[in-house]
Image: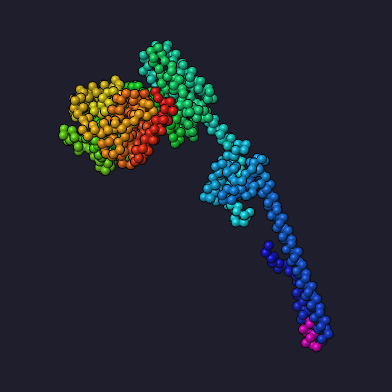
Amino acid sequence: MKDFKLPEYLRDDNYIFLVIISAFSVIFLLNKMYTVAALSGVILLISFIATIGKHNKRQKDLNNYIIDFTNSIENLSVSSLFNFPMPVLIIDKNGKICWFNIKFRDVIGEEAIIEKIEDVVASFPIKNLEENLQGMLNNLEVSHDNKSYNVLYSKLNEEQFVDNAAYILYWVDNTSFRTLKNKYNDERPIALIIQIDNYSEISEKMDKLIRASMIAEIEKILSKYASEMNGFVLKYDSDRFIMLIENKYLEALESKKFAMLEEVKEIKSSGEYFFTLSIGVGAYAKTIGQLFEYAKGALDISLGRGGDQAVVKRINSVKFYGGKSKAVEKRTKVKARIISFALRQIIDQSSNVIIMGHRIGDMDSLGSSIGLYSMAKSRGKKAYIVLNNVNYALKNLCDRMEKEDPSYMEAIITTEQALRLIDSESVCVVLDTHKGSFTEAPEVLEEVEKIVLIDHHRRGEEYIENAVLDYIEPYASSTCELVSELIQYMEDHIKLTKFEADAMLAGIVVDTNSFIFKTGVRTFEAASFLRRNGADTIEVKELFSEGLDTMKKKTEIIDKAEMKFGDVAISYIEDESEDNNVIAAKAADELLTVKDVKASFVLVKNNGYVHISGRSMGQISVQLILELLGGGGHLTMAGAQIQTDNIQVAKEKLYDAIKQYKEDGKEG
């Protein structure tokens, strides 16, 4: 301990008397009173020695008192910390335990032997302490007695406690709060809006008693699930139900892929008719009103994806379950008439119409764009088609366009030109995609105020939310089919040119693989309408003619194909070319003609990513497989893009997705 400096008020005042005696001794000496002066000197010396001794003793006693007092305080501090009513732990910078108090022993148990903080909390975030020298760690789980703690901590100064000690941690027991929070989360309501997809279509084909019996069976299944999940179900329309359950059962529903979907399909009439369900689930909303908004939005997505599935919508995520069945055509012409009327009004109120499909366009996106252009032109509006590049798939159509109807070439513009044409009254019509990032010009969507969306793909998580009008029909074969119907229901009859009719029929042909897949009654009606307007099947066929090099490349792809998982053919194109995407899609179609092949995938390298074209005969959903890789499409036709320039890496990801799909039991 450093020497203690005596305060002024504790110093001895005897020096005043010493000064006086010294003065008298000098006076006596000057007056030659030597005897008295000598006596004064002796008294002075004795007084000086006594004063010095008294001063030293006082200082020694005071120092001893201060040392004893300081030790008492330090002992009291250590004792207080040791007996502190909160667990306290001191560790070094590597997590080694330097010291802990009695209460911390209660945390870890009497028999526990610990050396490092990881012995208490296996994944203790020691780096967090270094990054933030004073703060809190929330909800650390301790295995002993299933306790949960919030840990307040601060950095220790050097030599403040023991050598190498770096942090002092105060453990606040928040087990009760966590238990209460978990109880709240477990019991918070989850809303399900359930719709029977094909109620109207099937009800017309069966006896009323049989229908009532089947609906009663569905209600019984839903009531069983509701009661098992501490909830209830209420029928509020002939084909709609609302169900409320506790949140803790949602995870079980998701893990079983909403088994009620399959149970309902097992209820079949004598005519082998069965119902399917679409389920919209709202979860983790802040209010009851928002919860039902989530559920309604989720149901819209489920219906937009073709039904027979459940969609769970949380604050920042959307998950899909089911979707095994092939979408059954159930559109009504009433809806087409309503959409056509609304679209006509929007076009009439616009200054110009900007039309665009998806990037790397195909016959369906460009054919439907041409049909929409014809509609806008018939309303006396300036219309433009955004097309930055003419790829291999569009070359034949664009060559014919330039030859037969050069006016179209003036209507085709780039993204930069489109941005210059936009004003406050412009309308943008997006065709054959509902994902903003997949459009030919995403920048246009950010600038234009009015957006119309027309698409036939099953709805995915990404969606253009701010459309003033959307027409999503996953039951349609193609966007050209939808646009053909809209043209028919325009108030003023629109006379298509032969080129326009051929272009739209080509779009239907390419998306149905020549009327093989996703072909319903309405598809043939649309084709019939186009045929009456001059469409020629021979000339449409010529739009798909291929060069010898393309045929050779398709043959090479088929030669490289490998059978995986017993019924899936997978091949690839190694070199990069702008034509490869189209060739890959055609090769995938060809691979389906191979015996025992239920699905085919062809991978092709592009600039910075690998594109995958997937096709199937319907037993395997290529849509669900490629959705696992961020893509989408239909049950029998889908695509995806993987951000890598390595074909092998992309193949491994595709293998994992197919494996997961099969393990989930999603095959229909």
First to last magenta residue range: 24-33
Tell which of 55 and 451 is nearer to you.
55
Q: Is residue 659 above or below residue 79?
A: above
Q: Quadrant of residue 485?
A: top left
Along the line of sight, the residue nearer the viewer: 380 or 206: 206
Q: Is residue 509 left or right of residue 462?
A: left
Tell me residue 458's x, y (percent). 36, 29
Horizontally, residue 291 falls left or right of residue 113, namely: left
158 part of magenta stretch: no
Residue 547 in the image, given as x and y percentages of width and height: 20, 33
Q: Residue at x 83, y 81 (%)?
A: 39
Q: How many marks?
A: 0
Q: Residue furthest bottom?
A: 32
Please state which of residues 436 and 556 is positioned toward the viewer in this rendering: 556
Q: Position of residue 48 (x, y in %)?
A: 77, 75
In the displayed structure image, the side of residue 67 where residue 339 appears, left or right: left
Q: Tell me which secondary structure the magenta stretch mostly adopts.
A: helix
